Amino acid sequence: MTIHWIGALLFITGSSLEGFRRSNQLQKRQLALIEFAQALTWMQNEIVKRQTPILEIIQTQIQRKGEVGELFGFFQDQLTMNQSLLKEAWTKAVLAYKPTSNLSVEDLEWITRVGDAVQPYDRQSIEKELSFIIDMLRSRHQEARNLALQMGKVYKALGVMGGILIVLLLS
Amino acid sequence: MHTILYLFPERLQQILVNSYTASLIGVEEIRIRIGRPVQIETYSGTEDLDYIPSHNDRQYVAEKISQHSFYSLEEEMRKGYVTIEGGHRVGIAGKVTLEEGKVKAIQSISSFAIRKATQQIGCADPFMDELWDPESKRWMHCLLFGPPKSGKTTLLRDFARYISIHHPGTENRSKKVSIVDERSEIAACHNGVPQLTFGTKVDVLDRCPKLEGMSMMIRSMSPEVMIVDEIGHERDIDAIIDAMYTGVTMIMTAHASSIAELQKRSLMDKLLKNEINHYICCSQNGYTLYRDNREVAVSERIR
């Protein structure tokens, strides 16, 4: 009998944890999106107004905690250790960062476009391209925030309820 | 390894190291043209390497020159050359884009001409006694002229070094030197700090236009000697004459293959007749110092 109770408890805990994980992921995604939008806005200002070289920008971005710092860390490795070209280094860095990221595949596609955006010679083009990406990230952040508000609680409730349902069905 | 080598893809680096060592001994200029063999200009002639650069190589070199930040070189690209760490000058050619009739940028780069900067310590020594006025205890104005690649900047750099260091045993010839380095070629500054050998009395205004730079230096650094490279425009000469009237000794360079050619430029004639008694003719073979049109000292060029 005790074994049954332990089993039931495990099912409910496991299912609840999955619900909380998914809810948490929604929260983390919207946080990551706003962090990226802020980091890219800073980067845009540095490029357009101060012409700061990309390696100096990386040094500052790496100091940021969270996913932005992680991605720029991979980017630095690609540029300095693997001697990759800018666009290739950025694409490889996004790929290396993907497994630990909370962003969706579509979000990552927008982030990947940064590699193209900082390539041109003239800063006006860079400003336009980065502005477009930043706007998209901000709009995706708004969607992600709404989704987190709507679905966060739903996932948590579904997790707990799902566990209980499985236990009831099995008993 | 020489800083220039870091600009190139690995295979080209190896070819260059095999032929000219990691210090690029004897190399004066490296020319990279897409689809044509890499060309090396040495003191003894020109050699084609067994390496044909591709579009990827072009991208590689361009990114290395700009440290992956093309946008940071927007102004330099407009002028057609970039000065990299170490004072080496990279000339760029390709498709130019215009805005309101003026060059906006060079896109689709097709050629790079990488000229190795050299520091020949001591090359100015044979002229220093001639340019020192023991009565006024001042250096005298001097103009260095010659065609491209004749060693003008190398000699100018050594003047700055000599004048800014203390020479034990001689009368106090050491003076405060201000360098207005429009293209980062004279002092090869990196983050504003000169990378080449100078004395303790050198101040450098890096990447600053000559006109503004000269007046800024006079106002702020009270120089005794001012060094400027490649004067030519009338407004440059006007500014130099003004600086001379403030009591600053001017040492400068100009592009010209002879004095006659130099005098054809407006205002240059005035400068030569009224203000400058000393000029040095630079050539591939060496340097000749003239005083009042008479040859007073000759020096062979050190390789």
Image: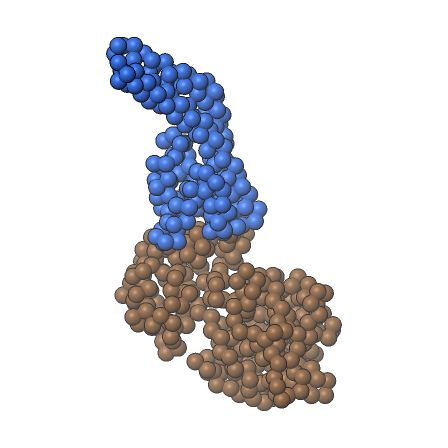
Query: Compared to A85, does B215 lie above or below?
Result: below
- The answer to whether residue B102 of the structure is visible from this angle is yes
Location of the N terminus of chain B by quadrant is bottom left
Left or right side of B296 for A22:
left
Residue nearest the observer in this picture, B203 or B232: B203
Give the residue drawn at x 43%, y 40%.
A114
Q: How many marks?
A: 0
| Residue A36 horizontal/vertical position (percent) | 47, 36
Q: Position of residue B35 (x, y in %)?
A: 31, 58
Place of residue B227 in the rendered image (x, y in percent of width and height, measured from the top left): 61, 72
Residue plotted at (49% across, 35% down): A35
> Compared to B69, does A97 lie above or below?
above
Q: Colour of chain A?
A: blue
Looking at the image, residue A85 lies above or below residue B146 = above
B15 left or right, relative to B252: left
Image chain in brown: B
Q: How is the image coloured?
A: by chain
Q: Residue furthest front?
A: A2
In percent of width and height, residue B218 lies at 70, 67
Does any portion of residue B130 appear in the rendered image? no
Judging depth in this view, the residue of B253 and B82 nearest the camera is B82
For residue A169, side relative to residue A143 (left or right): left
Residue B99 or residue A28, whichever sits in front: A28
Q: Residue at x 39, y 38 (%)?
A: A112
For residue A83, above or below residue B12: above
Q: Residue at x 33, y 13 (%)?
A: A164
User: Looking at the rendering, in which quadrant would you find the C terminus of chain B?
Assistant: bottom left
